[in-house]
């Protein structure tokens, strides 16, 4: 539903407000709407992430098989609603029913309550559209793995204010073992609920700790601006960088830290080379 | 909320962690009993062939063990990594959290119990339960 266009420029980290364009099709008609939001602060993102309340349910395999499957539950709607209500300044492209009197509008409560939930969810989803930039997986394109590198660059791409930003670089100093330990510990610390049909794993909020790791390791960024100028200092960068971007950058820096599972070789090859 | 349904931090669930660590060690031992004998390769060693076989084994194996809850698997995985790192790089005990220290101790107890209750086959290196009748290796079937 959010609309985008390619506008090669710097991503502004301190805009006065964010406009999220939405294209909504209903009953055969197309509506172009805009939600104008206050730029989220770290506290807003912390509240959003906490409201997601992710938990993993372990589904027992049928007939006592050793295999197991997992179902992830995330309260995306509740979290989006919470964030939208914190950020919404005004909306454009909507109109009241003509016969609706001002007192009736008052009767509905604030105008925010009249906005369809799906529109609010779409507007919040647009704020989270940041991901690692896609690189081809061939080694020749990525060059050699740099040994003893002092810095590691992570590239993200995102969509904001209806524009696409394909190259947002975050340059970190190479993580120490201590930083890696902190990251691993963060991923491993969960809560368990026993006593139901199957155990459930609750994943606690990790954003504040990820932001701390980012602040500890970041050296500089490229592709961002603050008041239309590249960040003047590291302190200014730490203050203005979006917490959700910090989260994605740190996760990309460390990866999932698990060995890659190579794809299964074709059965015919293995049959020909069977080990006896 | 009943006590059974109250969330418990997985790192603090030490008795369960120790028991599940022992389960994971036993599972790994059973895997060794299922693997083909390396010493019995009938053809010249071909690294590509061995890697292809290992890829197949990894892909065929369930990624997680059903009897160990995910929360415990995640924390045990962290402890096993930590154990490796602590022995590899300089790491003062003060740099570990209390939960990590207690977890490493639980891991140590589980390993001690596992070592006490298992033995390695002198012929093929498979790990076998120590207290079994017949005393033959599960993999090569030779006398232990």
Image (cartoon, coloured by chain):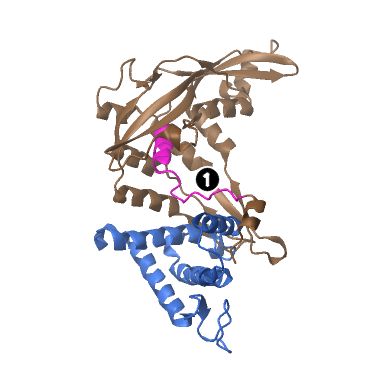
Please tell me whether residue A87 is drawn above or below residue A149 in the rendered image: above
Q: Colour of chain A?
A: brown
Residue farthest toward the right in the current orientation of the protein: A27
Query: Magenta residues, as a range?
Result: A243-265
Q: Nearer the viewer, residue A169 or A205?
A: A169
When asked about the image quadrant of residue B5, the answer is bottom right
Q: Quadrant of the N terminus of chain A?
A: top right
What residue is rendered at 60% in x and 54% in y?
A57
- Percent position of residue B88, x then y: 30, 60
Q: Nearer the viewer, residue A37 or B67?
A: B67
Position of B61 compared to A248: left or right? right
- Percent position of residue A203, x then y: 49, 50
Position of B71 compared to A254: left or right? right
Q: Please indicate, yes or no, whether residue B7 appears anywhere in the rendered image.
A: no
Residue wearing tag 1: A53
Q: Please indicate, yes or no, whether residue A254 appears anywhere in the rendered image.
A: yes
Q: Quadrant of the C terminus of chain A?
A: bottom right
Q: Colour of chain B?
A: blue
- Percent position of residue A200, x then y: 57, 56
Q: How many numbered marks are there? A: 1
Q: Examine the structure image and report whether residue A263 is included in the region drawn in magenta.
A: yes
Residue farthest toward the bottom in the current orientation of the protein: B134
Secondary structure state at the residue bearing disc 1: loop
When asked about the image quadrant of residue A112, the answer is top right
Please tell me whether residue A88 is drawn above or below residue B45 in the rendered image: above
Please tell me whether residue A106 is drawn above or below residue B109 in the rendered image: above
Q: Nearer the viewer, residue A230 or A36?
A: A230
The answer for which chain carries disc 1 is A
What residue is rendered at 51% in x and 29% in y?
A129
Please tell me whether residue A72 is drawn above or below residue A106 in the rendered image: below
- Percent position of residue A211, x then y: 36, 39
What residue is rendered at 58% in x and 81% in y?
B141
């Amino acid at each position: 539903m959010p609309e985008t266009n390619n506008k090669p420029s710097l991503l502004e980290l301190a805009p006065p407000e964010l406009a999220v364009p939405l294209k909504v099709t209903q009953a055969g008609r197309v509506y172009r709407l805009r939600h104008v939001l206050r730029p989220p602060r770290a506290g807003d993102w912390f509240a959003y992430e906490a409201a997601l309340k992710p938990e993993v349910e372990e589904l027992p395999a049928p007939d006592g098989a050793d295999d197991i499957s997992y179902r992830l539950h995330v309260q995306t709607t509740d979290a989006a609603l919470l964030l939208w209500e914190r950020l919404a300044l005004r909306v454009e492209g909507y109109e009241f029913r003509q016969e609706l009197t001002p007192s009736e509008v008052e009767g509905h409560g604030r105008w925010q309550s009249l906005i369809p939930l799906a529109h609010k969810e779409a507007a919040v989803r647009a704020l989270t559209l940041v991901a690692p930039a896609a690189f081809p997986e061939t080694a020749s394109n990525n060059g050699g793995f740099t040994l003893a590198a002092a810095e590691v660059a992570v590239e993200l791409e995102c969509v904001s204010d209806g524009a696409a930003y394909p190259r947002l670089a975050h340059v970190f100093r190479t993580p120490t073992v201590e930083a890696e330990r902190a990251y691993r510990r963060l991923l491993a610390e969960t809560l368990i609920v026993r006593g139901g049909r199957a155990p459930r794993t609750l994943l606690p909020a990790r954003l504040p700790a990820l932001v701390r790791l980012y602040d500890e390791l970041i050296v500089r960024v490229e592709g961002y601006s603050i008041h239309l100028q590249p960040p003047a200092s590291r302190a200014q960068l730490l203050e203005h960088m979006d917490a959700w971007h910090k989260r994605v950058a740190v996760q990309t820096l460390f990866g999932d830290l698990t060995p890659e599972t190579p794809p299964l070789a074709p059965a015919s090859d293995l049959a020909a080379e069977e080990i006896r | 909320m009943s006590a059974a349904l109250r969330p418990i931090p997985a790192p603090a669930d030490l008795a369960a962690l120790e028991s599940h660590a022992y389960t994971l060690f036993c599972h790994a031992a059973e895997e060794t009993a299922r693997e083909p004998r390396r010493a019995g390769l009938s053809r010249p060693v071909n690294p590509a062939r061995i890697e292809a076989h290992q890829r197949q084994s990894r892909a065929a194996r369930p990624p997680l063990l059903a009897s160990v809850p995910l929360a415990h698997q995640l924390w045990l995985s962290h402890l096993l990594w930590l154990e490796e790192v602590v022995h590899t790089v300089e790491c003062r005990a003060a740099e570990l959290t209390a939960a990590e220290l207690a977890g490493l101790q639980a891991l140590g107890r589980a390993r001690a119990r596992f070592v006490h209750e298992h033995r390695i086959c002198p012929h093929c290196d498979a790990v076998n339960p120590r207290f079994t009748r017949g005393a033959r290796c599960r993999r090569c079937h030779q006398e232990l």
